[in-house]
Image (cartoon, rainbow, N blue to C red):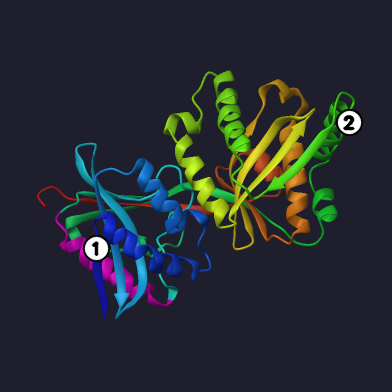
Amino acid sequence: MIETGIVDNLSGLDELTSEWSTLARSIESITPFQLPEWLITWWGHFGGGQLHIMIFRDGRKLVGVVPCFLHEWNNKRQMTLIGSGISDYLEPPIDPNYTQQVSAALQGHLAACPDWEVCDWQDLSRDTPLQKLALGNSVDVRISEDVPCSEVRFSGAFDEFWSSRPKDMRRNLRRYTQRALLDGELQFNMTGNADTELLDALIRLHAARWQQRGEAGMIEANRSAEFLRAVAVDFGNRDILRFFTIRYKGQIAALVLTFLYANKIYSYMSAFDPQFEPLGFGRNLLYESMRVCYERGYRAWNFLRGDEPYKRSWGAQPIAKCRVKLTRNAGVS
C-alpha cells in the first residue's frame, strides 16, 4: 500500500533532501535538472507561494516525489512544478517499479485536495505517467506537445563524427580558424570549477550579445544571475559542472556552461563576445568541446530545449516532451 505525504515547509524539505537525492540518482533517465540540489536552489531564488511536495512511500521506502508549489496565477490557484521556466527536464522522479501505484496515489491525492484549480506541469517526458491521470468529469485533462530538447549521441571515433558533418560546416570552421590565427592565438580549456572569472564572463557576454539585438537575454529576463552562481558552486563541488572556454589573444571569446551527469553533457548556457562575432568562435567552441567529450568517453552532448538548425547540423536528434494541464471544472472546490 502506497502512502502519500506532503512536505510544505523548509524543515521538512531539509529532512527529505537526502532520501530524495538517493531516489533521483537511482533512476536511469534523471538529468541534473531533476536533482533536488538543482530544484531546492531554484526554490531558494524563485520560489513563492506554498510548498506542496507530494511524496510516496512503500512502508519506509521513498518511491516517488512530485515537487510542486501552490500559488496564485491568472486568478487561479495553481499547482506548478518546482524548477519551471529555466529547467529543461522536469519529469518527477518515480521508481519505475512503482509507476502505477504512485500514479494511483497521486490521482487520489489530487482528487481529494481542495487547494488547487489548475495543475500546469511542463517539460515532462513524452511517455510520462502523469498524462494518464483520470480525475473524472470534474477535471479537464489536456496533454500537449512541449518544446523538444535534442542531443548528439556519441559513437565511434571523433574523426569519423567530424567527417560526417556537412561539408560547408567543416570548411567554414577551417577558414575562420585560419583567419583568426593570422592575428592571434586561440586557446581552449575545460574546467570543473565554478571559476568567478568564467561566471562573470558568462553573465556579462550573454547580456552583451542580447543587448546588441535589442533584447533581454535569459539571464536578465529571469533575473537568474545569482541562481546561476549558486548552482554553479554547488554543482562544481559535486563534480557536475563543466565550463568549456575559447580564449582569443588572451580574452574570453566564447564559453559554454554545461553539466556532466551520468556520463552525458547537458549544455545549459553559452555566451560569445560580440566583438569577435565575425570569427564565428561558436563553431570552434563546439568542435573542441565535442572532441574532448569523445576523448573522455562521454555518451552524448545534450543541447537541451529548442530545435534550432545549427543543432541538427551537429547531428542532434530531437527528444519529444509534453505538457500536462489539469483544470477543475467550474463549481468544483
Q: Amino acid at mark 1?
A: Ile
Label 2 neighbourhood size at 10 Å, few (<14), some (14-19), many (20+)? few
User: Is there any visible trace of residue 144 in the rendered image?
Assistant: no
Q: Residue at x 51, y 56 (%)?
A: 32
User: Is there any visible trace of residue 177 in the rendered image?
Assistant: yes
Q: Is residue 210 above or below residue 245?
A: above
Label 1 neighbourhood size at 10 Å, few (<14), some (14-19), many (20+)? some
Residue pointed to by mark 1: 6
As helix, strand or loop, the secondary structure at mark 2 comes to: helix
Q: Residue at x 43, y 69 (%)?
A: 23
Judge depth for marks 1 and 2 and give the one in front: 1
Residue pointed to by mark 2: 178
Q: Is residue 159 above or below residue 310?
A: below
Q: Earlier in the sequence, mark 1 or mark 2?
A: 1
Residue 71 position, x and y percent, is 24, 44
Q: Amino acid at mark 2?
A: Gln
Q: Is residue 148 magenta?
A: no
Residue 136 position, x and y percent, is 20, 62
Which is the main secondary structure of the residues drawn in magenta? helix
Quarter occupied by residue 95: bottom left
- Magenta-drawn segment: 97-114
As helix, strand or loop, the secondary structure at mark 1 comes to: strand
Q: Residue at x 55, y 32 (%)?
A: 203
Q: Is residue 240 above or below residue 267?
A: below
Q: Is residue 99 magenta?
A: yes
Residue 204 position, x and y percent, is 57, 27
Answer left or right for 80 relative to 37.
left
Distance in Å between CA atoms under marks 1 and 2? 59 Å
